[in-house]
Image: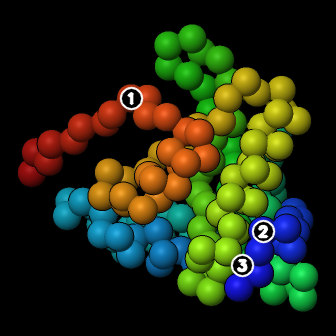
């Protein structure tokens, strides 16, 4: 596997749609909560990312990570968020997914560093992300990269 020093990032284009959509099942491999509709999650992600590839409004970006041979190994989808308590805009990682072949090769680290660079370029003071509680592997990666827990969201199914 390539080391992260050989990984480059570039803005995504509509030509990357098939690659990006092909990675979406990885978002649910860890087993989201039983009350989540996995099919609906995938449909929503597919629609949002397809729309963003066609028209990236201000405050959004998608970047592709590639190895030295131009093989795509992952992507990051970024957007603006607004803090509930101070109403300050910040960057938010909506999705970050690495191919199975790219796992362990520093691809996620490169993509998140690109997200941080993007957030700084937008004038944001911080970058946030959300992760399902059961996704322990991702949570550990984020902690190693300096991200800390903030608000814990609890859900009770009422039906």
Secondary element at image label 3: strand
Q: Position of residue 74 (x, y in %)?
A: 69, 73
- From what the image shows, is residue 21 above or below residue 134? below
In this rendering, would 157 be left or right of 99?
left
Q: Mark 1 points at which residue?
A: 151
Answer with mark 1 or mark 3, whichever residue precedes in sequence. 3
Q: How crowded is mark 2: few (under 14 residues within 10 Å), some or many (20 or more)?
A: some
Q: Mark 3 points at which residue?
A: 73
In this rendering, would 159 be left or right of 58?
left
Q: Name the residue under label 2.
A: 4
Secondary element at image label 2: helix
Residue 98: in sight, yes or no?
yes
Which of the 4 image quadrants contains residue 147?
top right
Which of the 4 image quadrants contains residue 121?
top right
Q: Do the residues labelled 2 and 1 touch (CB within 8 Å)?
A: no
In this rendering, would 46 be left or right of 78?
left
Camera-near label (3 vs 2) is 2
Q: Position of residue 77 (x, y in %)?
A: 68, 56
Q: Where is residue 110 in the image (x, y as percent from the top left)?
A: 75, 60
- Structural distance between the alpha carbons of marks 2 and 1: 31 Å
């Amino acid at each position: 596997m390539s080391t992260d020093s050989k990984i480059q990032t570039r803005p995504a284009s509509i030509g990357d749609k098939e690659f990006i959509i092909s990675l979406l099942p990885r978002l649910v491999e860890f087993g989201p909560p039983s009350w989540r509709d996995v099919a609906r999650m995938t449909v929503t992600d597919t629609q949002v990312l397809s729309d963003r590839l066609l028209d990236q409004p201000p405050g959004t970006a998608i970047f592709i990570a590639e190895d030295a041979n131009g093989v795509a190994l992952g992507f990051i989808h970024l957007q603006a968020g607004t803090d509930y308590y101070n109403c300050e805009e910040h960057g938010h990682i909506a999705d970050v997914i690495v191919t199975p072949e790219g796992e362990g090769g520093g691809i996620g680290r490169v993509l998140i560093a690109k997200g941080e660079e993007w957030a700084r370029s937008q004038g944001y003071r911080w970058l946030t992300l959300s992760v399902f509680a059961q996704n322990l592997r991702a949570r550990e990666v984020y902690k190693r990269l300096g991200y800390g827990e903030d608000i814990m969201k609890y859900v009770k199914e009422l039906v």
